[in-house]
Amino acid sequence: MLRNLTLRAQKKRLLVRPRVIVCVPSGITEVEKRAVRDSALHAGAREVFLISEPVAAAIGADLPIEQACGNMVMDIGGGTSEIAVISLSHIVVHNSIRVGGDKMDTDIISYLRKKNNLHVGLQTAEKIKMTVGSAYPLKQELTMDVRGRDIVSGYPVTIKISSEEIREAMSETISTMIDAIKRLFERTAPELSADIAERGVFLTGGGALLKGLDEKICKTVDLPVHVVPDPLECVVKGAGRVLDDVDRYRDVLIKRIED
Ligand SMILES: Nc1ncnc2c1ncn2[C@@H]1O[C@H](COP(=O)(O)OP(=O)(O)OP(=O)(O)O)[C@@H](O)[C@H]1O
Ligand SMILES: [Mg+2]
């Protein structure tokens, strides 16, 4: 897959072996780092750089991570959510939970099955989440017609569901995410936590687009919360910026043990 993507990205310059940057979760082990590096080299890379996803997200979101202040970033992806406090180009503390947007989809499936005897697939569940899903009460609550299969009769049916119901379905997952922020904040040194209390938490990744998530976090942990512009793209934007100026960003790259 990597080789194919490399070819597509390179287009005409087929003879030049590319430099490759790979974004990895912050909790990755040494063995996993080596495996990632080797895969990229086998796929034809001339040189491979690794960077933590939250750091790439922070750079993509234009946060001042090279300065001596604390920056808290939460990247909510499909399978995992990562939270990191970054200062002076380094991750000071981080926390990773195996819960993200996909868990919200399966929450919705279980809820509709239990409460409405309705079976829907993953794609429908994701669409419901994006259309009427929310983490905090909306000014104008929403409804949506959902098509699925009645579990008892086996026939296709359409029912109306509300944003309140979907909020209830996803509430436990949202609480898990907020607890992770609280726990990390407690582990953060006082000087940095003072910065974070002032500057707030920055949400990135597709999960940051869930309606009212910023408000819910803000009300629960009492910190300012901002969704970065283009949350789905800031990891890749940050990685691209680092690759364009590796010398400037050398400190943020993951060092090799051999170095
Ligand atoms: N508008 C939206 N509202 C709610 N969730 C959304 C929205 N848009 C995308 N998502 C969710 O964001 C998730 C994908 O986010 P992202 O692309 O950042 O993940 P990823 O980087 O591929 O995953 P990971 O970081 O776990 O490897 C999916 O669960 C998707 O359903
Ligand atoms: Mg991601």
Image (cartoon, rainbow, N blue to C red):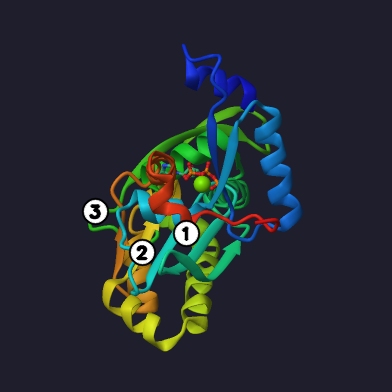
Spatial CA distance of label 1 from label 2 is: 9 Å
Q: Amino acid at mark 1?
A: Asp
Q: Amino acid at mark 3?
A: Gln
Residue at numbered disc 1: 251
Residue 204 visible? The answer is no
Q: Are marks 1 and 2 in contact (CB under 8 Å)?
A: yes
Q: Residue furthest left?
A: 139
Quadrant position of the C terminus in the picture: bottom right
Instruction: Tell me the SS state at disc 2.
Output: loop
Q: How many marks?
A: 3
**Residue at the image point whose x is 53% and y is 33% from the top:** 19
Q: Position of residue 126 (x, y in %)?
A: 49, 40
Quadrant for residue 232, please give it: top left
Spatial CA distance of label 1 from label 3 is: 46 Å
Q: Earlier in the sequence, mark 2 or mark 3?
A: 2
Q: Position of residue 97 (x, y in %)?
A: 60, 62
Quadrant position of the N terminus in the picture: top right
Q: Earlier in the sequence, mark 1 or mark 2?
A: 2
**Residue at the image point whose x is 43% and y is 64% from the top:** 89
**Marks 2, 3: nearer the viewer:** 2
Q: Position of residue 99 (x, y in %)?
A: 59, 57
Residue at numbered disc 2: 66
**Marks 1, 3: nearer the viewer:** 1
- Compared to residue 65, the image places residue 218 above or below, namely below
Instruction: Tell me the SS state at disc 1.
Output: helix
Q: Position of residue 8 (x, y in %)?
A: 51, 18
Ligand 1 within 8 angstroms of badge 3 C-beta: no
Residue 212 visible? The answer is yes
Q: Nearer the viewer, residue 166 or 70?
A: 70
Residue at numbered disc 3: 140
Ligand 2 within 8 angstroms of badge 2 C-beta: no
**Residue at the image point whose x is 39% and y is 80% from the top:** 192
